[in-house]
Image (tube, grey):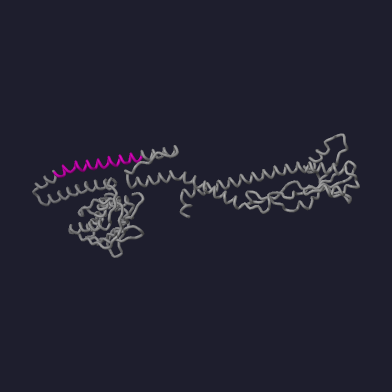
Amino acid sequence: MKAFIGSMTGRVFITLLLGVLLTAALTQLLADVERRRVIDEFRDLNNLDRAEQLIMATEIVPESARSAYIQVANRPGMRIELEAARLPALAPSPTEFTKNLSVRINKSPDNKPYRMQSLAVRPAACALAREQPVVYGLLRMKWRGTCESILVSLRDGTPLILSVLPPRSATSPEHADYTGTIALLLVSIGFLAYLVARMTIRPLKQLAQAAKDLGNDINHPPLDLTGADEIRQASAAFNAMQARIRQYIFQRTQMLAAITHDLQTPLTRLRLRLEKVSEPELQGRLIGDLSAMQAMVREGLDLARSMDTTETMQMMDLDSLLDSVCADATDASQHVSLSGSANMAMLGRPMDLRRCLVNLIDNAVKYGQSARVTVDRINGAARIRIRDAGPGIPQAELARVFDPFYRVESSRSRESGGTGLGLTIARNIAEQHGGSITLANHPDGGLEATLMLPEYYPGK
């Protein structure tokens, strides 16, 4: 769950979900408020009609029968009372409802008008808190409709108190169950947000995977030009970039191959002419320099080839490859020992991996006189440790030895024959297989190179 939230898909999903939920809640709140406003306006109009009818009917009824009539005419929401005791306190100014009722009931200018005044004391029922559920019952709002008492003087001077009370049911039923509605809303919004997040992030994931594949195989098939216009433009630009990089690498490899080929002929002629040098010491030095030049040219070409991935991936037995490499080194009179096994078949390029292992073993034998190769399996990956018996490398130099043509002065000198490309080539090959190479000085002495190779790498 934490990984999903941290991913781009999770962030887009959460942003969309919260945004849609907030918008839906705000829209529902505004709709509920507007609905209550319309209902209250309609109720006020209805109350004006009822109040006018009650007042005029009460006046028509004989005074002796008014009490009986009022008891029958009173209904929930509106009451009329005959005021025989002292008059209650009046409000400083009439309310809006009182004004509207006065205008409506006194519409005929020929008749004696009814006098209406708002009372300062509201009915007791107004103090009862009435709440209305809004936003599917998640929130509750107080009912704020018309609730007041009005002193009405009939045309014959009889005082009445008209009370406008809260409705019997101010809103939806108190025990309405919105659980199903809310659950359906959340599920539908979450599903839509997830679909939109996947549709939005899928092209970015495809571009990211294409970039990863490009780093492992420059000849990976180009992206399909599908989707929205912006995605097609990005895919086309990515394919064009891949084509240019492929062309640059091909031209560089061709150039190095041509240089190597062209240099071989004059170097061979130089070696033949050096055979005629009469002074043995000078002849040996010149031949040594020439051999170093030839080795540098060959390793420069190997470095260029190590960055090319034209070899086909295939299933291979890592233990068999290690046994073959170590056996060849032993046959070449190198002190190499092999222990352990990975018991793992992996997808890789056999020739490239052989070159990687040979470079690591040759380095160990060249600068440490021997190579102890230990193989095991850890966390689904093969761990190959190659330890020599040399003096090791200063801590500050461990990261720099992977740079092309870099040599540690104390051990990688010209007399040792190194060109400073072996570890660079090995690291390139390891990274193309999703692996890594690290160097460390062993506590018991010597330098130890650790090669990690996963069983399966998505970019292969």
Q: Is residue 171 left or right of residue 10?
A: right
Give the prevailing secondary structure in the magenta stretch.
Answer: helix
Specify the segment rendered in magenta: 241-268
Of residues 455 and 288, the one nearer the viewer is: 455
- Examine the image and state in which quarter residue 232 appears: top left
Q: Position of residue 443 (x, y in %)?
A: 31, 64
- Residue in the image at 73% along x and 46% along y: 145
**Does residue 394 appear to the left or right of 266 in the view shown?**
right
Front one among 141 and 63: 63
Q: Is residue 16 depicted above or below 411 in this figure?
A: above
The residue sitting at the right extreme is 64
Question: Which of the pair 255/149 is nearer the observer?
Answer: 149
Judge from the rendering whether residue 387 lies leftward or rightward of residue 111; answer left or right.
left
Task: Please determine whether, in this image, residue 398 is positioned above or below residue 221.
Answer: below
Q: How many marks?
A: 0
Task: Give 89 or 322, whichever is nearer the viewer.
Answer: 322
Residue 292 position within the rendered picture, expressed as x and y whole percent measured from the top left? 19, 49
Q: Is residue 33 left or right of residue 51?
A: left
User: Which residue is farthest top?
Assistant: 110
Q: Is residue 210 visible?
A: yes
Q: Is residue 394 visible?
A: no
On the image, the x and y values in percent for residue 450 come to 30, 58
Residue 318 horizontal/vertical position (percent): 28, 56
Q: Is residue 458 magenta?
A: no
Q: Quadrant of residue 157?
A: top right
Queried whether the magenta region covers residue 246, the answer comes back as: yes
Q: For the point 74% across and 44% down, which residue is it?
A: 43
